[in-house]
């Protein structure tokens, strides 16, 4: 049974309750049932109907398309922002100006300049801001860092992330901004590294202890696309860190088979693999049998509430995502992603709902090899890979 709350539930406004916002809606309900929060309002261009509100229908949270007005009328103390990437900065600053604390979905902004505006705005307003990298709440993260600190796998040689997901053609038709680099003069940067598999990049940086912008000295990107989109759907990135070990991520939305994304810590006497969506850790090291553990997780909204009511440290304050935002900026300013030649991919049936998807031949093995060797696609001999583009933060 959940413990009884010791404080008044925190009134929350949810901006963006469809798409991934449905997960936040369900999570707010769960925390409301525990007495931690109260859904005071929903900000959507089109109001949710009773079916979409579900268990909230009888409680009638206020709804409006005007975020600022909704914060004012509801007296919200905190807001969850789960809206298109290019709207994050404006909405975050609207909340901060009213003294409203934030859970801001990843990526926190589409540009480094907007990210800096958010940092400045929340600091001047004195509000808390939590960025929605849910994997940072996994209790596996401190456990892995302790294993590394105590030398369980020897000297760390690098951190490799792999993500092989399947997304069909309809995925890029779900919203006007899906798969876009920009709309008119507004940056969107909805690529595989910066949005759907952003957790792979950010989690690897977090495990490496290189989450701040100052921890990165250079970034190499290779961006490709099989789909007829602006942004990248099959890409890799390698970051040189001030602490030494490189961080590499290889990801795709055009997998042959959908797999669980993971981060591997490479040591000279073993390795640690972290399937971050499952909170599952496998330690393989010299002189020991494999050891697998599954860890608990602290919810980021619950952590934000605990921060507001008891002063608990935030798990994902914005500055801890500065290195990730350097990756976003490197992707944003890189040359346009290269379209893969027609022979590099084929069309297959979508896994659900009919329709089709595009599959890059051999990409599952290539992604895994990139994470295993810390090499880029071009270095692994992919015939369609471009020479590495190098940028510095």
Image: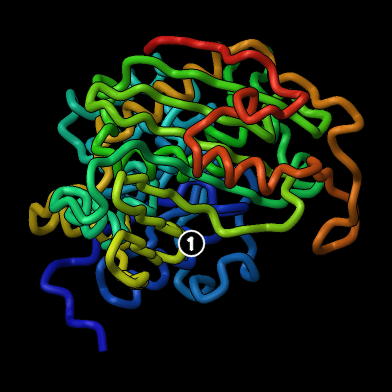
Vertical side of 340 occupied by 205: above or below: below
Above or below 73: residue 187: above
Residue under the image location 48 percent in, 67 percent down: 26
- Residue in the image at 53% along x and 45% along y: 162
Q: Give left or right: position of 321 versus 364.
A: left
Q: Name which residue lies at 69% across and 44% down.
A: 253
The N terminus appears in which quarter of the rendering?
bottom left
Asked whether the viewer can see residue 97, the reply is no
Picture colour scheme = rainbow
| Residue 82 in view, yes or no | yes
**Badge 1 local density, few (<14 within 10 Å), some, or many (20+)?**
many
Query: Residue sitting at 60 percent across and 40 percent down?
Result: 251
Residue 313 image offset from top left, x and y in percent: 14, 49
Q: Position of residue 62 (x, y in %)?
A: 46, 56
Quadrant location, the C terminus: top left
Quarter assignment of residue 316: top left
Q: In the rendered image, which residue does mark 1 sit on?
A: 25
Quadrant in the rendering for residue 202: top left
Q: Which of 223 and 46 is in front in this view?
A: 223
């Amino acid at each position: 049974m959940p413990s009884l709350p010791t404080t008044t539930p925190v009134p929350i406004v949810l901006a963006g309750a469809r798409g991934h916002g449905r997960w936040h809606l369900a999570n707010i309900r769960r925390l409301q049932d525990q007495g931690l929060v109260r859904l005071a309002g929903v900000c959507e261009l089109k109001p949710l109907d009773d079916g979409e509100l579900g268990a909230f229908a009888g409680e009638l949270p206020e709804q409006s398309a005007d975020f600022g007005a909704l914060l004012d009328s509801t007296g919200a103390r905190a807001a969850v922002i789960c809206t298109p990437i290019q709207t994050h900065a404006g909405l975050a600053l609207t909340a901060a100006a009213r003294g409203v604390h934030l859970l801001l979905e990843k990526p926190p902004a589409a540009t480094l300049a907007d990210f800096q505006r958010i940092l400045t705005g929340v600091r001047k307003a004195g509000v808390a801001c939590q960025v929605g990298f849910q994997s940072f709440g996994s209790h596996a993260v401190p456990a892995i860092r302790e294993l590394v600190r105590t030398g369980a796998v020897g000297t760390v040689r690098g951190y490799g992330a792999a993500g092989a997901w399947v997304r069909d053609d309809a995925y890029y038709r779900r919203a006007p901004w899906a798969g876009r680099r920009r709309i008119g003069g507004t940056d969107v940067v909805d690529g595989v590294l910066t949005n759907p598999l952003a957790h792979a990049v950010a989690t690897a940086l977090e495990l490496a202890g290189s989450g701040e912008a100052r921890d990165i000295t250079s970034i190499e990107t290779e961006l490709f696309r099989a789909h007829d989109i602006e942004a990248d759907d099959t890409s890799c990135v390698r970051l040189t860190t001030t602490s030494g070990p490189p961080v590499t991520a290889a990801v795709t939305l055009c997998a042959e088979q959908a797999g669980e994304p993971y981060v591997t810590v490479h040591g000279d006497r073993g390795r640690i693999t972290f399937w971050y969506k499952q909170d599952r850790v496998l330690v393989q090291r010299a002189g020991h049998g494999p050891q697998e553990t599954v860890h608990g997780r602290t919810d980021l909204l619950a952590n934000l509430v605990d921060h507001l009511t008891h002063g608990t440290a935030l798990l994902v304050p914005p500055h801890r995502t500065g290195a990730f935002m350097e990756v976003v900026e490197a992707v944003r300013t890189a040359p346009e992603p290269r379209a893969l030649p027609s022979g590099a991919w084929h069309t297959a049936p979508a896994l659900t709902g009919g329709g089709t998807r595009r599959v890059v031949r051999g990409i599952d093995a290539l992604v895994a090899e990139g994470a295993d060797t810390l090499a880029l696609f071009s270095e692994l001999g992919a015939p369609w890979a471009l020479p590495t583009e190098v940028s510095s933060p």
